[in-house]
Image (cartoon, rainbow, N blue to C red):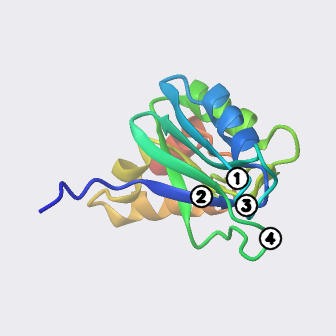
Amino acid sequence: MTSGKLTTCLWFDGQAEEAADFYLSVFKDSSRGSVSRYTESGPGETGGVITVEFTLNGQQFLGLNGGPQFTFSEAISFQIDCADQAEVDYYWSRLTEGGGQEGPCGWVKDRFGVSWQVVPSVMSALLGDQDREKADRAMAAMMKMGKLDIAALQAAFDGS
């Protein structure tokens, strides 16, 4: 029986290495693994990248240059648990740079089309609080935001 280790494979249209380099610059605890290249056997251009392995904050990824047949959608996203507003601001800014798109409720799409949820750690406590009135106020505040503002979410939760 195998260990059951999971690796997320991201399908790109020729930008796997560029995407890996970008993500390695965004996530501080990251590393690059091996890069596989096409040989004379094809099907791609000899020397072109087929796959690139990389690790972001302990999560393993494989970037695959699979072609234009499939694209990313919001049906799959990666959630970043942020300790404070500075982390929220950092990831929001970095992931939207160079053509990324801001979305509602803490969601962004990077320039490669990959969706990310930039979420403060406190969100689960605010939204899951037993006092439903407080939790509902926090939810209503979140639904009006793009980038999440911890102080504003806490103020809504507190009713101030």
Give residue 2's position: percent from left, percent from top.
17, 58
* Disc 3 element: loop
Residue 152, image quadrant: top right
Find the distance from the CA under tag 1 to the CA under tag 4: 22 Å
Residue 57 x, y percent position in the rendering: 44, 33
Q: Relative to the observer, which residue lies in front, 97 or 7?
A: 7
Q: CA distance from mark 1 to mark 3?
A: 35 Å
Q: Earlier in the sequence, mark 1 or mark 3?
A: 3
Amino acid marked by disc 4: Pro
Amino acid at the residue labelled 2: Leu
> Is 122 in front, or is 30?
30
3D distance between C-alphas at marks 4 and 3: 17 Å
Element assignment for label 2: strand
Name the residue beneath numbered marker 1: 108
Mark 4 vs mark 3: give the one in front.
3
Which badge, 2 or 4, comes first in the chain's sequence? 2
